[in-house]
Image (tube, rainbow, N blue to C red):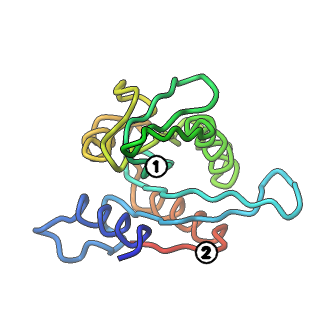
Amino acid sequence: MKLFQKIIHFFRRLFRKKDNPKQNKPENEQRIFHHVIFKDPFGIPNLTHEIDRIIVRRNGVFCIEDKTWKGKVYGFEDDGPWRQVFGEKHTIRSHPSPILQNDTHKKVLEEILDKRTENYVIPVVVMTENNSPLHNGKKVINAQDLKQFMDTHSSVNPPWNDEQFLAICSRIEKADCSATIT
């Protein structure tokens, strides 16, 4: 199974409701958009932004950057490159900060949804190998903690009604150049 398929399968299992076979109906509490690509909303020609996951729930929109880095990962919240150490030879690979990358995704998503939603988009980096370097539960979390994170981080009070929820999902679908929705 390819990595992309494994990640989609992981998200489906994580949020599966065993008692609700109508999981993808509009009355659901969430929609997951995988591998979303938006044209730049700020007018830069030929520029696109790829967001790994967007999860729309009644309590907010979660902008998720997946990282499947194996080994040990070192990085700081507001700092430059992150380092990944892996393998028997302790190979070191440098990566751009996924937090800074996802902050850009958050701004793009806010622009596409509407400026009125800017306080509702919650960016989070998910370490799928459960090797988060920060463990602060704010901007970087381990995959095993995602469901609890989303249950406890609400940006909408009161929760969105059906009309508001579906309008947000519709805006994402219309702006997306290439989506897989579950």
Q: Is residue 77 above or below residue 29?
A: above
For the point 46% across and 47% down, which residue is it?
62
Q: Would residue 101 appear left or right of 169 to someone viewing this image? A: right
Q: In this view, does 76 lie above or below 12?
A: above
Q: Which amino acid does label 2 sit on?
A: Ser
Q: Would residue 152 appear left or right of 66 to someone viewing this image? A: left
- Indicate the quadrant where residue 171 lies: bottom right
Name the quarter where the N terminus is drawn: bottom left
For the point 32% across and 61% down, which residue is it?
11
First-in-chain label (1 vs 2): 1
Nearer the observer: mark 1 or 2; the answer is: 1
- Pick whichever, 39 or 79, lies toward us: 79
What is the secondary structure assignment of the residue under circle 1? strand
Q: Where is residue 181 in the image (x, y as percent from the top left)?
A: 45, 72
What number is the disc on residue 115?
A: none
Name the quarter where the C terminus is drawn: bottom left
For the point 47% across and 65% down, which residue is it?
33
Could you tell me how far apart the alpha carbons at marks 1 and 2 are, in whole angstroms? 20 Å
- Indicate the quadrant where residue 86 lies: top left
User: According to the image, label 1 marks what residue?
Assistant: 67
Q: In this view, does 176 lie above or below 156?
A: below
Q: Is residue 180 above or below residue 60?
A: below
Number of numbered labels in the structure image: 2
What is the secondary structure assignment of the residue under circle 2? loop
Q: Where is residue 153 in the image (x, y as percent from the top left)?
A: 36, 35
Q: Where is residue 167 in the image (x, y as percent from the top left)?
A: 53, 63
User: According to the image, label 2 marks what residue?
Assistant: 178
* Badge 2 density bin: few <14, some 14–19, many ≥20, Cα 10 Å: few
- Pick whichever, 172 or 70, lies toward us: 70
Q: Position of residue 51 (x, y in %)?
A: 57, 56
- Pick whichever, 4 or 24, lies toward us: 4
